[in-house]
Amino acid sequence: MIEKTQAPVASAVPDDWLWVESLDLDAQGVAHKADGKVVFIEGALPFEYVSANVNRHKNNWEQGTLTTIHRSSSQRVEAGCPHFGLHTGACGGCKMQHLHSSAQVAVKQRALEDNLWHLGKVKPGQIMRPVEGPTWGYRYRARLSVRHVRKKETVLVGFHERKSRYVADMGVCPVLPPQVSAMLMPLRALIVSMDAVETCPQIELACGDTVIALVLRHLEPLSSADLARLRAFAQQHGVQWWLQPKGPETVHLLDDGGETLSYALPEFGIVMPFKPTDFTQVNPHINRVLVSRALRLLEAQHNERVIDWFCGLGNFTLPIATQAAAVLGVEGSEVLVARSRENYQKNCALARTNRPLCATEFVARNLFEMTPAMLIADGYADRWLVDPPREGAFALVRALADLHQQRLGAADVVPTPGAEHWAPPKRIVYVSCNPSTLARDAGLLVHQAGYRCSAAGVVNMFPHTAHVESMAVFDLVS
């Protein structure tokens, strides 16, 4: 939340006006009624006097929607998208377009600090400068819903309406790349012209550096006429069509021979091929800065071994391999491990003109059931890079803490064979997409595993949304 503010002295303020003190991560203004009851107000910003229509009542709090701004915040701005707002039918893809982009980052930074302290009792030694980048046209991945509206004889393609299962009536989307935003209306026209207009519920977008891929989910086989329509659209708009008749494993190119999706990390001479349904960062501009900062903070030396936990396709692993002596990439899926290994081999071939990559292994582990014995089996590493999903890395950190407690001679911890010959990493760089699970894991690292939190800061991966990406550095206390 933004720092709470004191209401200015205003003798003539009516009793039903509310002074907004702060902002929560759902972009709701937080105020208090005269009796002390908390009111969450959608659309209100800190430093504002407002009136609200309260539509939800609980014992300790109420929730409502902004009706009138009597005094406006200096951080309030005009939304950059015509479909953003509080009215019925407004797109729910963004929550903070009415707040200046720098203030959005401040909200996220405060949320990180609050979570670290209140959930983990951890205070970083340094608050790092936020990582920021373009606030518009950044979203290179998106899942667009498709709905045929028979009464209006049209098709809607876009995000869901705010707090609704219905699809917003969107003509443009400024957070998508401009060429994709310009395709929204042609996509609607395409789907409405198809025989399968009723059985195509979703289009997934994945942009590489040079290729735009669209994945069409279709519940029934497509007719030859529909396939011809897709090919004509691809030709006209310069995109690839991929088809998904069932689960993600069924995704395939409509026509073979298209250019491979990939993104580059030019600072490290790395090129990362991927498939449109793979997990890659939504914001490639920020991802490049994220990887660069993470490796600078990691400070891997040419004689050191590094483990990249939750390595995915190798987004961090391969750049680390340009700096360390040896790298181990660990992921929970054999399929992902095979893909990571393939990306490593492709970049080794490219290394004749780029930087050579060090010896790198990839292994599959159930990272949500890690044990001290498994940590010991994977061997000593000087440094760790940890980049888990929203659930965090509790089992991994718990195993590390148990080994530390064994070294301290804790009576309630069962000794692990080989622990006496194993040592913890000197530094851990933890990249997180959920400040609450980061705070939980940080509490374990600091209070039970022998580390201090040297630094932490936010990464504004998703401007105008409530998503908080962050990074923290943990150093072993000698």
Image (cartoon, grey):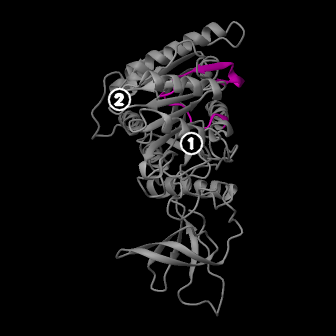
* Quadrant in which the N terminus is drawn: bottom right
Nearest the viewer among 309 and 240 is 240
- Of the 4 image quadrants, the one containing the C terminus is top right
On residue 86, which mark appears? none
Distance in Å between CA atoms under marks 1 and 2: 47 Å
Name the disc covering residue 472, or none.
1
Residue range in magenta is 263-285
Count residues near mark 1 (Cα–Cα under 10 Å), then give few for <14, some for 14-19, many for 20+.
many
- Tell me which label, 1 or 2, sits earlier in the chain: 2
Coordinates of residue 133 in the picture (x, y in percent): 70, 43
Q: Is residue 323 visible?
A: no
Q: Residue 37 location in percent, x, y?
A: 44, 79
Residue type, label 2: Glu
Q: Residues within 10 Å of mark 2 (few under 14, many from 20)?
A: few
- Pick the residue in front: 337 or 296: 337
What residue sits right under mark 2 in the picture?
A: 220
> Tag count in the figure?
2
SS at circle 2: loop
